[in-house]
Image (spheres, helix red, strand yellow):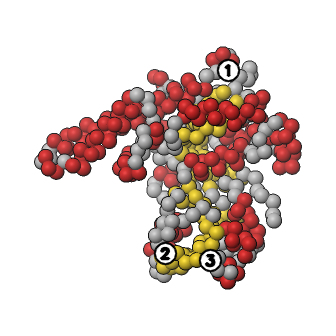
Amino acid sequence: MRPRPSVRIEIDNANAYSQRSTGERSQALDVALIGLASSGKSTLLRALAAGHLPHHGSPAEPAVAVVKVPDERLDRLAALIAAKKTTYLEQRILDFPSLSVGKKGPTAQMLGLLSTADLIIHVVRAFTDAAVPHPAESVDPARDAAALDLELALADLGVVERRIERLRAETRSLAAGARGVQERELALLDRLKEGLEAEQPVRALGLTPEEAALLAGFNLITAKPLLLVLNVDEADAARASEIEAAAAVQAGAGTGVVALALKAEADVAELPPADAAEFRRELGLPATAAAERLLQEAVAILHLITFYTVGPQDTHAWAVPAGTPAVKAAGRIHSDIERGFIRAEVITAEDFLDAGSHTEAKRRGRQRLEGKAYEVADGDVINVLFNV
């Protein structure tokens, strides 16, 4: 088995973000990295990029860093068949400049860019390093997290209020018996307005899948999954699980919590892999590097599952939401495959690794045929039969 690769990063500039904004389809997930000044957001990016930081070409747009998500199953599958190419899941880290609160809150343009992200990672200061501005007694992660959350909630509140105003005017022009759809949307928006005015993010309001689908076009920022990164002192790294558990009680639905000693993690990330493992032990850091854990937490909080296509030219990992039918998963590979879908040959990754090939898995009865409605499971190895 070949060694598992470390997190790899490709640096891009703001033009890459503009490409995605035009509607071009991308396999990568957009992850917005935000935080107040001195939170350690840049230190987290350094841990992800192993020192190769993207350049902010314009203060009006985030810089972009493309990160490949480590995947041990994918490594084993590719090694088994000696694949010429291994394609990992990718996350595009959109590095926003430090945000402000109050009168100098986030600009409308920044909020607009933020609303297109798939996931938000919010870095919050929880360390007391004397070399960093602010005295130790002013360190209050709950306060800082709430302050920026409020700015985002106010932005969403403005969107909701404007939609309510337009919808009420539209409803008044309709006959009483034709107002059903508009009245249902108004009831939902009124509920969102009440929650946002109480400083509750939309993700914490317990929306049904149908309600969430109705709101999808609004791109509400606080409806997006959030990963809160508590940037703790190196001395607290060993207590990370305890810190996370305490913070998770207040975090609410749709929010994950990770506690990391980012300065130490960033320093270790720049070392050769052999030296990094030793230093992690000496510093009392978790065995899993911050970059790897964050990328995998991002996949988990988005409720994504990973399936694979295995071939000698390219062994490829693909991400889709849990519950995705096979025909839609096929479209993730290529729209022609979705359009001409006939059926899917499906094997679990472990069965494929045990059998060694599609042919042997089929001979052992481990391969099965599935139709369009089959819900793809995490770890499936899929070969789609199609005709266009």
Q: Which residue is mark 2?
A: 371
Mark 2 residue crowding within 10 angstroms, few (<14) / some (14–19) / many (20+): some
- Please, what is the three-letter code of the amino acid marked with disc 2? Gly
Can residue 265 be seen here? The reply is yes
The residue wearing badge 3 is 367
Query: Element under label 3?
Result: loop
Mark 2, secondary structure of its residue: loop
Circle 1 — which element? Answer: loop
Res 63 → quadrant: top right
Mark closer to the chain start, 1 or 3: 1
Q: Position of residue 293 (x, y in %)?
A: 68, 46
Residue 60 image point, x, y percent: 51, 38
Q: Is residue 195 left or right of residue 93?
A: left
Residue 315 to residue 321: above or below = below
Determine whether label 3 and label 2 are within 8 Å by CB: no
Where is residue 294? Give x, y as percent. Answer: 65, 45
Q: Are marks 1 and 3 in contact (CB under 8 Å)?
A: no
The residue at the point 44 percent across, 32 percent down is: 200
Q: Amino acid at mark 1?
A: Pro
Label 3, label 2: how far apart the Cα atoms are: 13 Å
Farthest front residue in view: 365
Q: Is residue 275 left or right of residue 156?
A: right
Q: Name which residue type carries label 3.
A: Gln
Res. 32 image quadrant: top right
Q: Residues within 10 Å of mark 3 (few under 14, many from 20)?
A: many
Which residue, given by chain and number where applicable, does mark 1 sit on?
A: 133
In the rendered view, tell whether residue 209 sits above or below residue 106.
below
Q: What residue is shown at x 78% (from left), y 45% (from top)? A: 287
The quadrant of the image that shows the N terminus is: bottom right
Residue 302: % across, % down: 54, 50
Asked whether 132 or 328 is in front, the reply is: 328
